[in-house]
Image (spheres, rainbow, N blue to C red):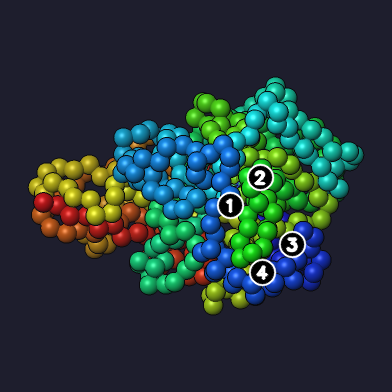
Amino acid sequence: MDEVAYDKRRLRQWLDGRAGGFSRRDLMRLTAAAGVAGALLDATPAAADAAADGPIVKPLPPELLKVFGTNAETRWAALADVGYHVPVDRFFVRNHTSTPIVDGAAWHLEVFGAGLRGDPATFTLRQLKSLPSVTRSVTVECAGNGRSYFTSQQGQTVSGTAWGLGAVGVARWRGVRLSTVLRLAGLSSRAVDVQASGLDPNFVTGGVDLGPVRRPLPVRKALDDVILAYEMNGSPLPADHGAPVRLIVPSWIGIANIKWVGRIEVSDAPLFSPWNTQFYRFFGPEFPTDGQPFDRQSVKSAFELDPGAVLTAGRATRLTGRSWSASGRIKHVEVSTDGGARWRRARPVGPSIDDAWQRWELDWRPAAGEHVLLARATDVHGNTQPDVARFNTLGYLFDAVVKVPVSAA
Ligand SMILES: Nc1nc2c(c(=O)[nH]1)N[C@H]1C(S)=C(S)[C@@H](COP(=O)(O)O)O[C@H]1N2
Ligand SMILES: [Mo]
């Protein structure tokens, strides 16, 4: 069964009230109390962790990161001089509350639930590190990446963090396959869903405590390519990115990549949490029923410069950027320097990796004045970027070609 069919079945079960964990009645109550839109807008940091001054631990220099409350996005101009992987100092952070400081030596992972053959299993960090490891370059991208363009480019009102295009990054993640851990824990053939919960403070919104950040994965995805990662770019996972252990879920939306994993439930029935019911669904007139589920990211492109950048008129300039697709490698990238009238193929730079991105470049000699740059990627399956993204009230999966104003003087 594919993901869409699976999601539809879960949606039916949820609407029928057959779902455990988070009921439709809970959602109604929440919606009445705060409104789905308010629920996101009102998201403020929970009481700061004693160990951290703010919701994010690492320094947030404005030339690398742009802060939005408990979150920070990468400045694309800060990727112009780095290689394939985004260094930790400029990797975006998406925190529902605040980065907890978890002692890796005392930490252990608990795997439990009716989808196991027997009792819960526990693993220390040392045990996880002694298991066979995998290392992969994988994109983590927030489902809301590019959300501000729904408003600035399409004139639509959406709620949530007004990200530009910087809520995305590729890193080299090392860890143990989730499948290895689940099998050691005694996975049974009855298992249906696998849900990791974070050790960060509970997410409280509209006066309702939604509990720890968590979102179920169908067991098929959990056994496929998911990693319990303990290293990022060759170093132990930093606090803000989920230390000591986080999930890496290739090609799926950012929220699937649960940070600071403390427990993993393996269920014999579909699981529901606010993060696959109230959030991370498509709501709005273009989507019937209570919200269409989705799991995968889309296709996007970005230039490695700030919107509004000033270039030197009449001088050869090398435009650089990156494109990525959750469905496969990038086949080609077209760039326009005149607002979309003419398009040229960008030159690929370095590798195009499944579940990561393709770097590219194009030489251009701008005339004095204002210009609009566009980049449009197509992946090996023919998926490409539309001119208009499909409106949804929570502003997810903005995949349209972004208009980037620059000037030359
Ligand atoms: N425990 C926990 N896991 C989490 C989150 C969170 O707030 N708490 N945010 C999620 C979201 S919405 C995204 S986009 C990614 C961001 O990962 P990063 O902060 O390492 O860039 O983490 C996900 N995992
Ligand atoms: Mo996200």
Residue 188 position (above or below residue 104): below
* Residue 30: mark: 4
Precedes in sequence: disc 3 or disc 1: 3
How far apart in space, not on screen, are marks 4 and 1 (Cα)? 18 Å
Q: Amino acid at mark 3?
A: Phe
Precedes in sequence: disc 4 or disc 1: 4
Q: Amino acid at mark 1?
A: Ala
- Depth order, front residue of 400/309: 309
Left or right: 217 as drawn, with respect to 84? right
Q: Quadrant of the N terminus?
A: bottom right
- Residue at horizontal 12 percent and vertical 58 percent from the top: 369
**Corner quadrant of residue 242:** top right
Residue where numbered disc 2 is placed: 198
Mark 2: few, some, or many residues within 10 Å (few <14, many ≥20)?
A: many
Residue where numbered disc 1 is placed: 46
Q: Amino acid at mark 4?
A: Leu
Left or right: 353 as drawn, with respect to 206? left
* Residue 22: mark: 3
How far apart in space, not on screen, are marks 4 and 3 (Cα)? 11 Å
- Residue at horizontal 64 percent and vertical 72 percent from the top: 33
Callout 2: CB less than 8 Å from ligand 1 = yes
Q: Position of residue 283 (x, y in %)?
A: 57, 70
- Depth order, front residue of 385/126: 126
- Depth order, front residue of 28/321: 28
- Depth order, front residue of 189/119: 119
* Residue 345: mark: none
Residue 254 position (above or below residue 281): above
Helix, strand or loop under label 1 = loop
How far apart in space, not on screen, are marks 1 and 2 (Cα)? 15 Å
